[in-house]
Image (spheres, rainbow, N blue to C red):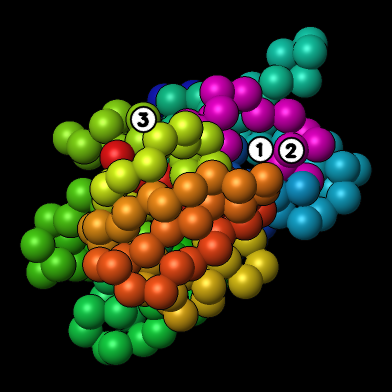
Amino acid sequence: MDEDKEISIQILNEKFPAALEYIKEIFLIHRDYGMVKNSVLAKRLAVSKPAVTQAMKRLNKYNLIEQDLYGSICLTSAGRLVAAKVLKRHYLIEHLLIRSLDYPWVKSDEEASRIQASLSDEFTEYLFEKMGRPETCPHGNPFPGSASEKEILSALRLNTVSFTGRSRIVRITEEGEAEAGLLQFCYENNLRPGRELEIISREEGVTVVTLGGASKIRISDEYARYICID
């Protein structure tokens, strides 16, 4: 198969239903950390290492990934195209669910994963225009290739800050969206992209913040590492 030949998402999903999630996560891990290993992918997707090994063999046959002698995984040009399409669909479904259907912000990521393979390219572009050509998902993660992608990805993680004072939440990382309890914690404390906060202090394993002078919110590093600020 020609590496540059476009692969239908629907057909790929029919032949290998798990492929889209693997490709999406490979793209996201590489985008945030620059290197993807089987062990990291297994942890992110909550599957066994042998399952990842078999999946990589199948994706390689479709010319969607390459893996070097040291085990590092990267997407081919065809794989990156699939990843970009899947993420665009995923993010637009989240916008549709939250903005048009009033679906809970906390649950939209999980639901979008169930629906993303069924959208056509035509409907995806319709949604993109209908939703006002957004540059990020509702949790602040940038569309692949968007004008603000590099700036957003360079935002500081809250657990790494060494200063106090005002800042603004930029995104809850994709990795964080999958972290048990994090989105619910953010929802309950109104910690969303665009919200201004004040960093009061950094304690051992905890960042203390307030929103507009309200009650202090203690954010453990377990969560703070997935919350990015400018």
Q: Quadrant of the C terminus?
A: top left
Kind of residue indicated by mark 2? Val
Residue depicted at x 21% and y 84%: 100
Tell me which segment is drawn in magenta: 29-42
Q: Which residue is mark 3?
A: 154
Q: Quadrant of residue 126?
A: bottom left
Whether residue 28 is visible, yes or no, is no
Left or right of 217 in this view: 148: left
Q: Quadrant of residue 218?
A: bottom right
Element under label 3? Answer: loop
Q: Badge 3: how crowded within 10 Å, few (<14), some, or many (20+)?
A: few
The disc label shown at residue 59, or none: 1
Residue 90 is situated, as x and y percent measured from the top left of the image, at: 39, 61
Question: Residue 50's x, y, as percent?
Answer: 90, 43
Give the residue type at disc 3. Ser
How far, Cα to Cα, is label 3 from label 1? 30 Å
